[in-house]
Image: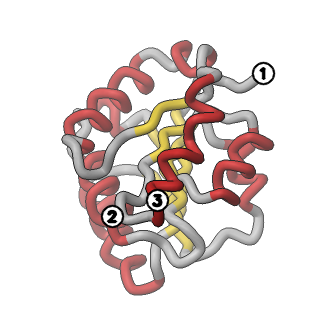
Amino acid sequence: MQRFEILIVGGSLGANFFSEQVTAIICSLPRELREKIYITQQVGKNDISKVKRIYNNHKIEFFIESFFDDIFEKFKKAHLIITRSGGSSVAEILTSRRPVIFIPLPTSFDNHQLENTKLITNIGGGWVLDQNNEVVKTLKKLLENLIKNPKNLLLQVIR
């Protein structure tokens, strides 16, 4: 694997948590791992220049837009997807057959985003992390493991 491609999708309007926290977690990875990754990230229009500057400062290769017209092409290139777990996101992930890290919106009605993750995570298609519960440490460790051992992704691909 030449580079480890991560697709981060925070919804069609972007998500502040993804722009700030997930970006910061990726930038906190050790330098040798940051050099191996390529980030494609959906970011809200107001955060684009800030997120680009952060990735540039940490020497991380990236492509950032506020909306992707070709989301299925992005899915095909990604080794790993990080996203919320709304109904349409989960359906797209199922179709893409790509491993995923879900970070459900903690304020979703009746916690439906967490419920949406169960189909994929129960069959080994990915992981679900609680945004309110040590996500920073957990996501960093998971990313480090997957970048160092990309074969672990093969265990997660939905067949």
Q: Secondary structure at mark 1?
A: loop
Which residue position is annotated with label 1?
Answer: 159
The spot of residue 43 in percent (x, y) is 47, 71
The spot of residue 42 in percent (x, y) is 53, 66
The kind of residue on which mark 3 rests is: Asp
Q: Secondary structure at mark 3?
A: helix
Residue 40: quarter of image: bottom right
The spot of residue 22 in percent (x, y) is 33, 53
Dot 2 and dot 1 residues touching (CB under 8 Å): no
Q: Which mark is residue 17?
A: 2
Q: Secondary structure at mark 2?
A: helix
The kind of residue on which mark 1 rests is: Arg
Q: Residue at x 28, y 64 (%)?
A: 20
Dot 3 and dot 1 residues touching (CB under 8 Å): no
**145 on left or right of 153:** left
Q: Comparing marks 3 and 1, which lies closer to the viewer?
A: 3
The spot of residue 100 in percent (x, y) is 56, 38
Q: Which quadrant would the C terminus be assigned to in this image? A: top right
Q: Which mark is residue 110?
A: 3
Decide which of tag 2 and tag 1 comes sooner along the chain: 2
The crowd level at tag 1 (other Cα within 10 Å; few <14, some 14-19, many 20+) is few
